[in-house]
Image (cartoon, rainbow, N blue to C red):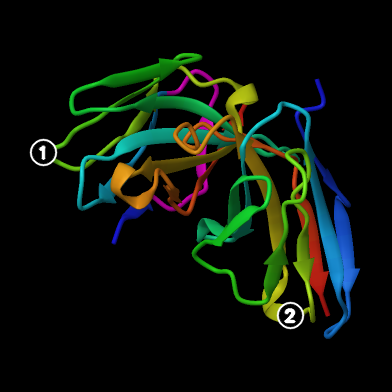
Amino acid sequence: NAGVTQTPKFQVLKTGQSMTLQCAQDMNHEYMSWYRQDPGMGLRLIHYSVGAGITDQGEVPNGYNVSRSTTEDFPLRLLSAAPSQTSVYFCASSPTRVTNEKLFFGSGTQLSVL
Amino acid sequence: GNSVTQMEGPVTLSEEAFLTINCTYTATGYPSLFWYVQYPGEGLQLLLKATKADDKGSNKGFEATYRKETTSFHLEKGSVQVSDSAVYFCALSDRRAGNMLTFGGGTRLMVKP
């Protein structure tokens, strides 16, 4: 079972560059989400989706865009990277929004913005 | 709003020592409480959970009891192993907040042989 797959694992960007972090799950989960992990701050929710075609903002959405065209994929876009976006990013999914407390996490993308 | 506070780490223990990682929470409703674990280079995994007051969650020798009177959910293990070295996150979900998870800052545990 692949579970939740994130690519790339590491990325270095220059300020102002754009990029897309990929996330795919093969468990037919309705609910998908993106978190960022910063030292001492735990995980903070960026955006989430309760199904294909439906997305919503989390706690820290500024500077990020998402889309959900299929059940499997939930890419996260940085339109113009800033040093404040240096972080570890995790994609997570769960069967439904009701069960979103039991999340299945990908292994993370470590992003550095110079 | 909801919040979770964990003891700061790192916590360094010798193998077979007793472990306690403190977690307290603030919530307006009646949350469910969780402990997630993150092993090096991996994403988080659900370790245990409790959904109502006085419930005890347990898994892999770890336990935590939902204490409403002290708004706490402390993680304990009687005898830690080197393989328990990881970062532990306390979290809550509140049905009135759409079941979204609120995480604490994480506590790194290092177990030495």
The relative height of residue B12 versus residue B49 in the rendered view (above or below) is below
In the rendered structure, the answer to whether residue B29 lies left or right of residue A21 reads: left
Quarter occupied by residue B43: top right
Location of the C terminus of chain B (image quadrant): top right
Q: Which mark is residue B69?
A: 1
> What residue lies at 24% left-to-right and 21% top-to-bottom?
B55
Q: Quadrant of residue A107?
A: top right
The reply, left or right, for residue A68 in relation to residue B23 is right
Quadrant where the N terminus of chain B is found in the figure: bottom left
SS at badge 2: helix
Residue B40: mark: none
Residue A114: tell me if it is visible: yes
Residue B24 on image: x %, y %: 28, 46
Q: What residue range appears in magenta?
A: B6-17
Which residue is at the front of the view, A24 or B86?
A: A24
Q: Which mark is residue A83?
A: 2
Distance from the alpha carbon under mark 1 to that under mark 2: 42 Å
Residue B4 rendering spot, x and y as whole percentages: 35, 52
- Dot 2 amino acid type: Pro
Q: Is residue B11 magenta?
A: yes
